[in-house]
Image (spheres, grey):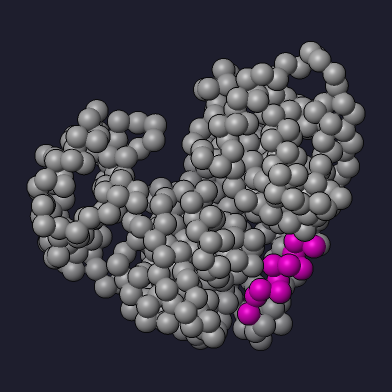
Amino acid sequence: MIDKVFKAYDVRATYPQPLDEGIAWKVGHAAAEWLTERAQRDGLDHPRMRHIVVGRDMRKSSPSLAEALKRGIRDFGAHVIDVGMVDTPMTYFAINHLQCAGGIEVTASHNPAHYNGFKISRAQAKPVGTGSGLEAIRELARLAVEGAGERHAGREESVDLWDAYRDHLLRLLHPSVLEGSRVLRIGVDASNGMAGTMVPRVLGGVPGFDIVPLHFDNSSGSFTHEPNPLVEANLREVQEVVRARKLDFGVCFDGDADRCVIVDEQGATVGCDLLLAALAQDALRGKAGAAVVYDLRSSRSVREAIEEAGGVPVESRVGHVFMKAKLAETAAPIGGELSGHFYFADMFNADSGIRALLAVASLVAARGRALSEIIQPFRRYAQSGEINFENADKLGAIDRLKAAYPGAPTSDLDGLSLDAGEWWCNVRLSNTEPLLRLNLEARDQATVDRHVAMLAPILGHRVDH
């Protein structure tokens, strides 16, 4: 069962099979052992280095899974700090604010309501994934047997950090919005997820925000629409309300509110790479020479925008484990992925949907222009979007693609990136499925369409979903 629930970046599966309270106990026990030993090995000597933060989302299975998880932590002999029903970035905040050995959020993010799982972070909210500790926790979980061996009486306490979280975030907001001299009207679709709890607790009472709420009720643990803002259909309601009420912009969060997608005042979806280009230019003001980390699938305009602002563009592999590590390595103030994850140094290099919303609000307030106008200068190229191709011989297809363009510069940082001059692309290999994922860009749509058609026979059977 253990192998069925451990994924590349977290623990996630359907509930109650294969993920149940028995496995939750094993994960808690194993994570407590690994996190506390890692903190000791790293020489961290804060008094709370045997404390583990536990937060949970609003899913029906989350309370019972959280209880079993906490029991496993305590049975190992570590101590639990329960921060309650919170968004995942709040758990990252709590780990740092309380200086703990790590933390675990009980959530399945954007997956349907019958899924659940655990996002594990070590001290300073550094990610735990494949290559950074998750395999070791999986092996420890295999060996853990509830009721066998000596039990240790770890303690548990509950802590309310909403005020501290709000204070930390609002310090990062543009003064004109905080004070109310600039009032922004924003449509917010919480997707019946944790943003429905978090947004009122953080933004409630701020004079410069006039929020039009959509799907804030998360009491049932179910979703009106899939809590995945990357699916264009899930943005329809916030797009409609932005247009109908003439709002400044809209935002749609995923289930645990660590990522979001923005729509402009016209209701048009803003590509996350183009949004990063705009946010990076603001983040680089007064920081010439600073790095900005970006997903290697991003538009070439992102790299150009960073360089134009005096920054250093740094490509990263896709995935929060790699993005967070690269931000820490380069001391970058900001980074972002096409998936709607935006990372901030002032949020401990972690991804945060609410921090991204504040960054967009501050951008609009500071520029005094419509969001579509701010983004327009970065719409320099035509993009294919991510296209999936089914192929059982993924590595063979990559080799054939290289051979088809022998003179083109390539990079294998994440799959294959290839620059053919008038067009360029990245092809990534799915970790879990026989799929290749193509992103191709050129100066015009005709060139994009032509070369996607030319690559298709090499990459396999196109799958549109």
Residue pictured at 71% horizontal, 60% vertical: 200
Residue in the image at 69% along x and 24% along y = 26
From the top left corner, tell me how far across and down residue 315 is, in percent: 39, 61
Asked if residue 35 lies left or right of residue 423, the reply is: right
Compared to residue 199, the image places residue 219 above or below, namely above
> Image quadrant for the C terminus?
top left
Q: Quadrant of the N terminus?
A: top right
**Membership of 289 in magenta stretch:** no
- In the picture, measured across the screen, residue 281 lies left or right of residue 219, that is left
| Residue 170 highlighted magenta (yes or no) | yes
The residue nearer to you, when weighing 247 against 7, is 7
Report the front residue among 216 and 55.
55
Residue 454: where, in percent of width, then height? 10, 48
Find residue 234 and report its horizontal and vertical position in percent: 45, 49
Quadrant for residue 97, please give it.
bottom right
Residue at image point 63% right, 36% down: 118
Q: Quadrant of residue 117 in the image?
A: top right
Tell whether 217 sits left or right of 115.
right
Residue 315 visible in the shown view: yes
Compare residues 76 and 455 and report the one nearer the observer: 76
Please name the residue shown 73% across and 38% down the image.
37
Res 116 visible: no
Q: 376 or 217, which lies in front?
A: 376
Compared with 96, 168 (above or below) is below
Give coordinates of residue 302: x percent, y percent.
36, 69
Tell me: 308 left or right of 158: left
User: Which of the 4 quarters of the picture holds residue 128?
Assistant: top right
Determine the main secondary structure of the stretch shown in magenta: helix
* Residue bounds of the magenta highlight: 164-174
